[in-house]
Image (cartoon, rainbow, N blue to C red):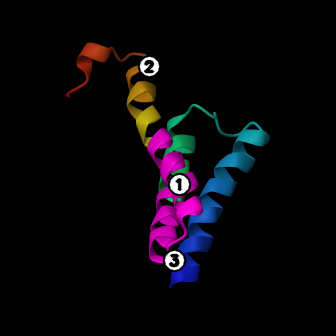
Amino acid sequence: MYDVVQIAGSLLILAAFAGAQVGRIDQSGRRYLLANAAGSAALAVTAIIGRERGFLLLEGTWALMSLGSLPRRTASLPGRRAEDEVG
């Protein structure tokens, strides 16, 4: 199960990256950020289980940065105003 989670998390990150490289996904877009957040969070969990501190630092930071960018991305969508956000 551990390997399945690692592979799934890695594939999410790699798919988002590949999509951005070929111009199919916007790197500041919601899909890209969600894929990165989910993939890196999964990898961070496996780093906790495996007691891999360096990997946890990398993936935990990656997940937090992706999640932290989502509210800004949602607020800047066309037709939405920051004051429309519930928060």
The residue at which mark 3 appears reads as 50
Label 1: which secondary element: helix
In the picture shown, does residue 71 fall above or below 33? Answer: above
Q: Residues within 10 Å of mark 1 (few under 14, many from 20)?
A: few
Span colored in magenta: 40-66
* Residue 46 falls left or right of residue 20: left
Q: Quadrant of the C terminus?
A: top left
Q: Residue at x 49, y 73 (%)?
A: 51
- Tags 1 and 3 touching, CB below 8 Å: no
Q: Which mark is residue 7?
A: none
Badge 2 element? loop
Q: Residue at x 48, y 53 (%)?
A: 60
Decide which of 27, 50 is in the foreground and name it. Answer: 50
Q: Are marks 2 and 1 in contact (CB under 8 Å)?
A: no
Which residue type carries mark 2?
Ser
- Compute the Cα span from label 1 to label 3: 13 Å
Mark nearest the camera among 2 and 3 is 3
The percent coordinates of residue 54 (x first, y second) are 58, 60
Residue plotted at (31% across, 16% down): 82
What amino acid is at disc 1?
Leu
Q: Nearer the viewer, residue 28 or 54?
A: 54
Q: CA distance from mark 2 to mark 3?
A: 38 Å
Q: Secondary structure at mark 3?
A: loop
Kindly identify the residue that appears in the image at 51 percent across and 69 percent down.
47
The circle drawn on residue 57 is 1
Mark 3 residue crowding within 10 angstroms, few (<14) / some (14–19) / many (20+): few
- At label 3, the amino acid type is Gly
